[in-house]
Every structure is written in structure tokens, then in C-alpha cells.
Amino acid sequence: MSAFASRLGLAALFAPALLAVSVTAQAYQAGDAIVRVGAVAVDPQEDSSNVTLNGADIGTDVGVDSNVQLGITGTYMLTEHVGIGILGATPFEHSINLNGVGKLADIKHLPPTVTLQYFPMHSASKLQPYVGAGLNYTTFFSEEFTSANKAAGFSNLDLDDSIGLALEAGVDYQIGERLILNGAIWYADIDTEASFELNGNKGKVDVEIDPMVYMVSLGYKF
């Protein structure tokens, strides 16, 4: 995990919790909608198979860089303690590196995630921690080899989309009548197979990206 992502993750989860817990008349209740906007970091915890060419192992695997984008989350409260959560963001951009060799390609992805959230605190508490579980769908696009690798014969890079488990933990802290400070962490089960060609030879690699996702944001309760 990158040092930046580690610091962002700790700030995301614990900074709001350092504020004192108090009670307000502005309760979380059924029908409330909370929208949050802020910085979101994807930090892949990747585990890659070795790359193969025409089925032959070439003896090295791949790595995936971290990236930060603008994120948006929403919660719709079904009851005082249960909500539906959604995570979205501007497209993440990652460099794919062939370990021991260098940068191989650039890709983009969108990871929309839907979770069922549980808020255990009294509905009128300013501090509202929560946990959630659900599904992540990740779609990859704009897969491009570097110019040097294209010149060397690499082409037709394609990454399969992924559906997997998503887990989250977060905390809302009410800082105004409707304004909310939020920090949150997700784990997403993202697995993909990347296929490509090298001078007519068929190549592929399986990657478990499985990122930790960290977000700090400002929210508004409708």
C-alpha cells in the first residue's frame, strides 16, 4: 500500500471520530438522502499470475499503480438504521507495469458499488458510524500500450469486466444543520483477465486487483 493511500485511509476513517459525540434534533430517519463529494483513492492490493505467450510462461507478472479521483457517494435511509449506499467516481487511471521491466500500458476503469448499510447509533446522534456489504461492478476501458511497447509489437489489449463482493466502513459527523463530514473505506473484490497480442502471439495474464478504497468527503442531508 502506498504511504499516501495509508495516510488518506487513516484520515478518512478516524478524523471525524476525533470530534466529540453529541446529540442533535436532526435525526437520521427513513426517507433521508445523503449525498457526499470528495477525494477518493484506489490502492490496488494486486496478485497477478505470470504473463503467458501462446500458453508459455514468460516468468514475470504485472503490477497496478494507485490513483486518486473525484468521488461521490449517496445513502438513502430505508429505516433509522438501514440504508442503501452507492459509490461512484470520475474514471480512475492506472499504469500497468511489467515487473522487472517497466511500464507496459495505461487503463481506465469505473467501479460503481452498491451496498446495504447499517447505522448502529441512535438516530439523533451527530456521529453516525456505519458498515456495509454489497456488490461492485468494474468496467475497464481505454486500454492502451505505451508508444514504445506498441512499436515493439504489443497490441489489442483488453481487460474483462468484473463483478465481486464489496465491504465498507465509514462514519458521518454532522457539522451543521444539514452538512456532514465523512470518512470511508471499502474493500472490493475485482478480478480480471487481460488479453493482448505481441507480434501475432496471444498473451494473457490474470490479475486479482482487490483494492482498498479510501475517501474523505463533505456531505449534505436532504
Image: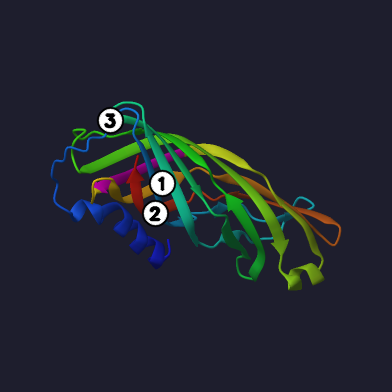
Q: How is the image coloured?
A: rainbow
Q: How many marks?
A: 3
The kind of residue on which mark 3 rests is Gln
**Circle 1: element type:** strand
Which residue corresponds to the image point at 34% horizontal and 63% vertical from the top-left? 7
Q: Is residue 142 magenta?
A: no
Discs 2, 1 touching: Cβ within 8 Å: yes
Report the magenta residues as a range.
166-173
Please give the residue where the numbered disc 2 appears in the rendered image: 215
Residue holding disc 1:
186
Secondary structure found at label 2:
strand
Quarter assignment of residue 199: bottom right
Q: Nearer the viewer, residue 144 or 55?
A: 144
SS of the residue under disc 3: loop
Left or right: residue 112 versus residue 81 is: right
Q: Spatial distance from mark 2 to mark 3, Cα to Cα?
A: 24 Å
Location of residue 187 with respect to 96 vertically, above or below:
above
The image quadrant where one finds the N terminus is bottom left
User: Would you place residue 20 above or below residue 98 in this image?
Assistant: above
Q: Residues within 10 Å of mark 3 (few under 14, many from 20)?
A: some
Residue beneath label 3, please? 29
Residue 40, image x, y percentages = 44, 56
Whole-Å distance between the Cαs marked 2 and 1?
9 Å
Whichever of labels 1 and 3 marks the residue nearer the N terminus, that label is: 3
Q: Earlier in the sequence, mark 2 or mark 1?
A: 1
Q: Position of residue 144 (x, y in %)?
A: 71, 61
Mark 2 and mark 3 lie on one chain; the one further toward the N terminus is: 3
In percent of width and height, residue 93 lies at 58, 60
Judge left or right: residue 205 versus residue 46: right
Q: Going by the image, does 51 lie left or right of 82?
A: right
